[in-house]
Amino acid sequence: MNTFSPEDNLDISESSPSSPGSPLGKIDLSGLIQFGLTEAVNDQFKAIIAKDSDLVPGRVTRVDGISTFVQTASVDYRAVSTFARIAHKDEFEIEPAQPTVGDWVLVRPGEEQNPDELELVLPRISLLSRKRVMRGKEQGDEQILASNINTVFVVQAATYFNPSRLEREIALVWGSGATPVVVITKIDLLEEGQDPTVAIAQARESAPDVEVFAASGITGEGTEPLRKYTEAGSTVVLIGASGVGKSTLVNLLMGQQTMETAEIRESDTRGRHTTVTRQLLRLPNGGVLIDTPGIRTIGLVSGSEDALAKTFSDVEEYMWKCRFSDCGHSSEPGCAIAEAIKSGNLSQTRFDSYMRMGRELQFEETKNDAAAKTDHQRRMKVVAKANRQRTKAEKRRKS
Ligand SMILES: Nc1nc2c(ncn2[C@@H]2O[C@H](COP(=O)(O)OP(=O)(O)OP(=O)(O)O)[C@@H](O)[C@H]2O)c(=O)[nH]1
Ligand SMILES: [Mg+2]
Ligand SMILES: [Zn+2]
């Protein structure tokens, strides 16, 4: 990853053709380094400001209704985003954008009584979203949780570890373009004789190819290895059920009480969320954390087939070995799935989860929400394109 040290010269005034008297004529973006600014993002900002020096670059730290809180190199803006659009290279390509926490954006400061307008959103390199489910009823649309994240800490408590939930969470993350990391918290609460290695082993089974850590946000035990994900220039978002200890972990990594934390009331089945808004925080070392409110249900957005395949790569591998290519994995001869289950290499529960989630996605496909699906696919296409461009730019820079 390309990151800056604060000493790097980020003065981009030379490429800005603004009038000498303009207060924005000499823009110094070094203040954004501590909000995760990378060279690639800086280059994109530079190119845009060269054409329009009134725009101010920044990063979205919080979204509250119609207000988008943007941290820029010097001041904070509370901007409206009615006409925000993705900053495609082709200026005539107009794609509306709903800004989210983590977005790199350009604000047009309002003159006199006019509000500050969030105008452009840089193409995202990753986008975490889920299907919105309200009070047990599907609401159908997609909730965008965070963007431009490198790593997602999927947090579960050792005291009530839930493997099938973990599978869903991992699938959600693989679909975003970011890398999942499992963090099992509250290991200090395990009674004597109870061992975190049990939960770790379970997590490894539910999340093959994913790193698993066990830690305590209270004692700090096991948290040191997590810091390698939070280096300068990288963004980490924490997701998980309410009360698993996301904010407690955030506070520990921040080295201070930044987020409110609280015991959830057992009697309240709705679950009381202590954290109510997604919020971007900067770590003392230049990394960025995004704390989120607990998610109760993890709905996969349609088009998540690849994410499902990645989550259940072990299951799919067995499937390839079935004698018949159209094997139903029930009682067919030469079924590698049945064999794996019988020999104990694959658990029946895991296979059932895979089938259930596959059916859910299939149902999504058949449902009449073609519009929602294309929205999601279009958004992820932009993410893929942004990644290709970034890789190319990085190669150019290295050569
Ligand atoms: N003993 C112990 N308690 C913990 C640990 N992590 C969190 N807690 C406690 O668990 C409760 C919930 O922690 P939070 O950090 O508020 O949980 P959260 O995941 O942020 O919850 P929401 O904001 O509602 O999504 C609090 O009372 C914490 O003190 C831990 O590692 N060990
Ligand atoms: Mg919280
Ligand atoms: Zn089979």
Image (cartoon, rainbow, N blue to C red):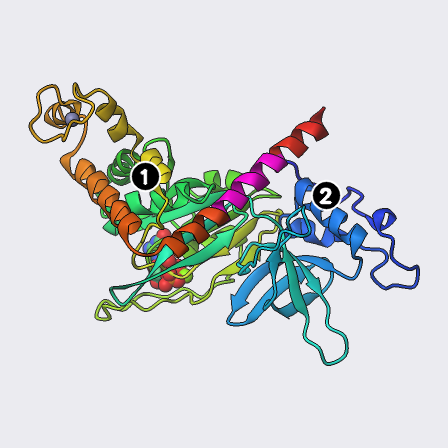
Do tag 2 and tag 1 residues touch (Cβ < 8 Å)? no
The amino acid type of the residue labelled 2 equals Asp
Magenta span: chief secondary structure: helix
Number of residues whose C-alpha sits closer than 10 Å to that of mark 1, classed few (under 14), some (14–19) or many (20 or more):
many
Give how far across and how far down residue 15 sits, in percent. 84, 47
Q: Which quadrant holds residue 74?
A: bottom right
The amino acid type of the residue labelled 1 equals Leu
Q: Which quadrant holds residue 241?
A: bottom left
Q: Which residue is mark 2?
A: 43
Q: Is residue 389 magenta?
A: yes
User: Looking at the image, is 392 positioned above or below residue 257?
Assistant: above
Q: CA distance from mark 2 to mark 1?
A: 34 Å
Comparing 221 with 135, the one in front is 135
Q: Which residue is mark 1?
A: 308
Give how far across and how far down residue 99 sits, in percent. 55, 60
**Is residue 267 visible from the viewing direction of this image?**
yes
Position of residue 223 in the picture relative to residue 14 (left or right): left
Number of residues whose C-alpha sits closer than 10 Å to that of mark 2, classed few (under 14), some (14–19) or many (20 or more):
few
Position of residue 158 in the picture relative to residue 218 (left or right): left
User: Looking at the image, is 312 positioned above or below residue 107?
Assistant: above
